[in-house]
Amino acid sequence: MRNILLLSLIVLAGFMLSCEGMYDKQEQYEGEIVYPAKYDTVVGHIGFERVEIDLLKAGRLPSDEINLGKAKKTRIEYDDQIIEIDSLVSYVNITGLTQSKLYRFKIFTIDEFGNESVPQEIALIPFTSSDLANFAVSPPRVLASPSAAVIDWPNGISSVLMNYYGLTFEYTDKDGNVQGGERGANSRFFIGNVEAGKPVSIDMEYKIVPIVNRQPIMDTVVFNSALNVNMPTSSSEFAPAEKDILIANGVTTFTADGVSSIEKLTYPVHANSLQDIFYFPNIKILDLTGGDLFTLPELHYDRNGVQDVVGGGSFAPFVRKMGDISNGNQQALKDLLEAGILDKVYYVPHSMGLDDLLAPFVESGVVELIETPSSVLVDNQFHLDGLLQDGNWSLDVIYPATDAPEGEGLENIYKVIPRKTSASFVFALPKEYSFNADEYKYLKMMVYLPAASNFTGIYDNFRRLWPRFMNNMWAFGGNSSFGQEYWELPRFFIEESDLENWTEVTIDMSGAQGRHTRVFVINIGGEPWIDYNPPADIEYYFANIRFTKE
């Protein structure tokens, strides 16, 4: 028993000796901090007197979805400023950065004991009011008459330094009334009732997004500027865009005084610009139908020993201007309508490409859409000799045909005798015009073919007709500003049961919609490419060639 007690005392003494200095190694670590996790990225974005800084690669998340271990809060430091946020955030928005200088930002996470993470650091220069003060907008184009002006930017306001989104303008007219307006993407605006020969100051506010280092900033800002317009006097000359049209309207002196007595202007359908109406201070009526003042232009042909002319004479309702009047050249009309200056505008639907512009003014009666006939004959002034294109298009044409078979209501009768395998009967418009297929959807004609005995053997194909449509015949490419937009319809036979009878043929003109078609060709035979030499002449008759709405 005594031996057991002695052994226990020896073991206890050894254990106590071994525990001496057990905290010696811990002492060297006392005072150290375990840092909370830091944000895993730092990406800056510049705004107007502010910046946004993204802090997570995962993107912008709500705070309750962010887990960074023991990290609980966020601290931002820059200059002598400290911003603390009681949560973790995926990005920060720092405002009040009014100085155009480099700001250095440090962003920490903080744990519940106030321990900070290793910071994320970034340096950014915000866009400020002082930067905005150095901006300038490209000067506008000013179209001015003595009492009004149009201000626009043909090349736009946006530049490598900014993106433009809108503007407001304000000025005082000669009666002391403040006038103004707001514009969006289309920055053009009109000022009126201002004093001739005096400068007009226009207060401008532009809505822009500045571009810094080739990147748009985050914010839209308003840039203020004054625009001064020197108004011409009433004796100042203007340079007309359509001088011949104005002369036809009786204009001899191209000043506001010289045109002050003119209250009505008439334009032909083929006019290219309406901007001159802006210079007429007392204009009330605008006739866009040509009225009795203008005839169709003529187009002269000379080729293959043949000379011919199409056009001339009065306006044909089935034609329209070749292409639309450009936006820039129709804006003066829009300005005068919106300003309430015009009392009446006469217009043939789909004739000049102004339909959308004029539509808001139809209900009030300011714009009157002229009702055209439901059916219009194609007069002989548009017939063209096919030999001008190709010798194989040869045929004899007798007009008016006095020996035509009897029929009811026949007008404008042609006798046609093919001479070659590709004989073609051609009609064309002056190059300033195309067919108005939006209004006149069908081309119709009465056709008479002789007895079946004329169409035996290889000549049976000559019961076929082949409608072909184009902007210009291939030998006359200069007659179209829109290139060639050829289209055709399938060749079709006149049934044997319809021979020796007047038969109506209807051709759908929908293929001309969206194109600039001004020539149609009725090919007789469908080009079978034979040595055309029938035992006797095959005589065809065409009558009542017309465009119809239905």
Image (cartoon, rainbow, N blue to C red):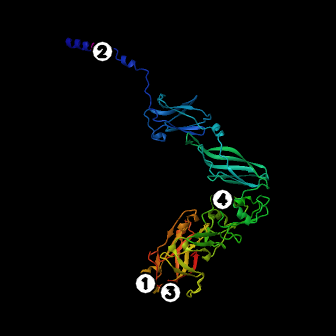
Mark nearest the camera among 3 and 4 is 3
Residue 15, magenta (yes or no):
yes
The residue pinned by badge 2 equals: 18
Report if the CB atoms under discs 3 and 1 are less than 8 Å apart.
no
Q: From the viewer's perspective, is residue 304 above or below residue 505?
A: above
Callout 2 touching callout 3 (CB < 8 Å): no
Q: Is residue 61 magenta?
A: no
Q: Earlier in the sequence, mark 4 or mark 2?
A: 2
Residue at image mark 4:
329
Dot 1, how many residues are within 10 Å of its Cα: few (below 14), some (14-19), or many (20+)?
Answer: few
* Residue linked to disc 3: 500
Nearer to me, 501 or 328: 501
Q: Amino acid at mark 3?
A: Glu
Q: Position of residue 223 (x, y in %)?
A: 65, 43
Mark 1 touching mark 4, by CB under 8 A? no
Q: Earlier in the sequence, mark 1 or mark 4?
A: 4
Look at the numbered discs 3 and 4 and tell me whether their residues touch, using CB distance below 8 Å: no
Q: Quadrant of the N terminus?
A: top left
Residue 450 relative to residue 12: left or right: right
